Amino acid sequence: IELNLANDVSKKRELADKLISRFPNISEPLFIKSSLYGNNRGDVRVNLLTKASKIKPNSAKILLSLFRSKYNLFAYGASNLIELGKNRDSLSSINDQINKIISTDTLNASMYRSFGDIFRYLDLKKCSEYYKKGLEVCNQQGNSFRAEMLITVAYAEYLNGGNFDEVLSIIEQAIDTEFDPLLKMKRYFQYHIISMFEKDYDNAIEILNRFEKDIRSFGFTPSMVNQTKVSIHNFRSVAHALNGSKDQSLKDLQLFKKFSNLVLMDIPDLDNNFIN
């Protein structure tokens, strides 16, 4: 209770140390202390979680947290992962760790997401397989994580050279499935961005047209609607320009400035350099 009530991270770490000293043969205090360090301190997390795993070797949450801490992209780096993939022994070790984690918990969708994220830099085909397994778990459970898994599956399919219409169809499912309005907004922009990347400007424009019509149903405050419209008009202006529609691009540019100024009225201390 005292640990939960402590507001200062340093104080929480001190309390965790006391628990570790008092209960040296219990893994939970070590796990708790590891959670008090961010992604930039993977070295500390790995040390604590390695000790915890020796006490409780079949704990799914400890093994998964240890795996994520070892191969954290923020600390480990994508370039290091790519190099790691060239080493057969290292790759074998990663697969062994994954298989052990899966043996302890087969119904954790976010676990498969983590494995897929790592293999995005090692083996795109295997990356896609892990993402699809995570989606399969979500489908079985009616999991709220389903929309996120759909997006990762779509991206993996795209990177693997999949049919672009099928990729867009998967993102459409993510838009329809997402219940959180802020994340739903993100899905619309993800659809737009991948269409722009594919130079499918008509689709990129159409999805923002749909989003603009749909935004009133999101339950956003007037200020949030204005902020969202800043992004819509900004992105759509670029899409129209690349699609050769100069007049439509200029129209969106003017609306971008209009809604930007409305946002500045609501948030006067906002940096307004992006408007000019």
Image (cartoon, helix red, strand yellow):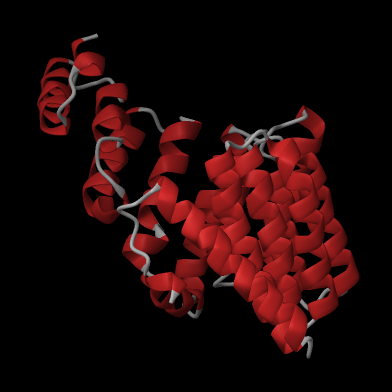
Left or right: 267 in relation to 137: left
The one of 102 and 146 positioned closer to us in this rendering: 146
Q: In the rendered image of this protein, does residue 46 appear above or below residue 193?
A: above
- Residue 259 picture location, percent across and down: 56, 59
Q: Nearer the viewer, residue 201 or 98?
A: 201
Q: Please give left or right for residue 171 compared with residue 61 in the image.
A: right
In x, y percent, where is residue 14? 9, 26
Where in the figure is residue 226, as x and y percent of width and height? Answer: 57, 50
Return the residue nearer the eye: 244 or 91. Answer: 244
Q: Residue at x 18, y 19 (%)?
A: 6
**Farthest-out residue, top:** 1
Residue 243 position, x and y percent, is: 78, 86
Q: Quadrant of the N terminus?
A: top left
Residue 253: which quarter of the image?
bottom right
Placement of 112 over or under 179, stated as above or below: below
User: Residue 152, located in which quarter of the rendered image?
Assistant: bottom right
| Residue at 33% in and 62% down | 271
